[in-house]
Image (spheres, rainbow, N blue to C red):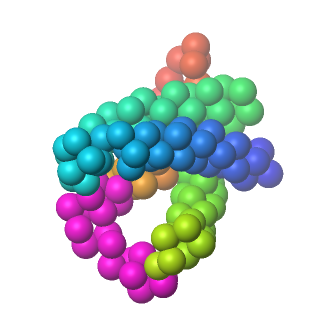
Amino acid sequence: MKPVAAGLIYFALVYAAGFVLGLAREVAVNPLFGKVLAVLIEAPLMIVAITAAAIWVVHRFTVPVDFVSRLIMGITAFVVLMLAEALFAKVFRGQSLDQWISSFATAEGIISVVLFLLFAAMPIVVRNAGSSPTP
């Protein structure tokens, strides 16, 4: 149960960061640089948020370092993220599920998919802060 709870907290932290950065991107960066460059500018900030959140959550919730526990955390967070993204696309952008899925075929969509996959994998990649790696 600990990896599931950790995955939900991890999702919430990263989604909040993504919401704030996405809003800034849409309002301030897109008009100046265009969609693709705006997403490329946002991506490193999201990578920092993803990494920091994963490290903090696995440490705070003492999620075991074993692959299965971290996989469960990452999958939980990823599934909730996909549901939230699909709902956001429907409610705030008026997109159907097909339109939302099709949006991943664009350059900015591909960047988003890479970030989503990194988000899912990060709990496996990071170690508990201050712990030594296990063999």
Number of callouts: 0
Majority secondary structure of magenta residues: helix
24 versus 100 height, above or below: above
| Residue 83 location (% of width, % of height) | 60, 68
- Give the image quarter of residue 125: top left
| Residue 56 location (% of width, % of height) | 62, 27
Residue at the right extreme? 1
Give the residue displayed 40% in from the left and 45% down from the top: 27
Closer to the camera in the image, 62 or 8: 8
| Residue 75 visible in the snapshot | no
- Give the image quarter of residue 6: top right
Q: Does the segment drawn in magenta span residue 112?
A: yes
Closer to the camera in the image, 73 or 46: 46
Give the residue displayed 39% in from the left and 77% down from the top: 101
Give the residue displayed 47% in from the left and 46% down from the top: 23
Give the residue displayed 33% in from the left and 79% down from the top: 102
Closer to the camera in the image, 30 or 62: 30
Horizontal side of 97 relative to 80 (left or right) equals left
| Residue 120 location (% of width, % of height) | 48, 52
52 versus 84 height, above or below: above
| Residue 20 visible in the snapshot | yes
Q: Does the segment drawn in magenta span residue 51?
A: no
| Residue 7 location (% of width, % of height) | 66, 48
Closer to the camera in the image, 96 or 116: 96
Horizontal side of 49 relative to 8 (left or right) equals left
Q: In this picture, which residue range is highlighted in magenta?
A: 96-113
Horizontal side of 129 relative to 126 (left or right) equals right
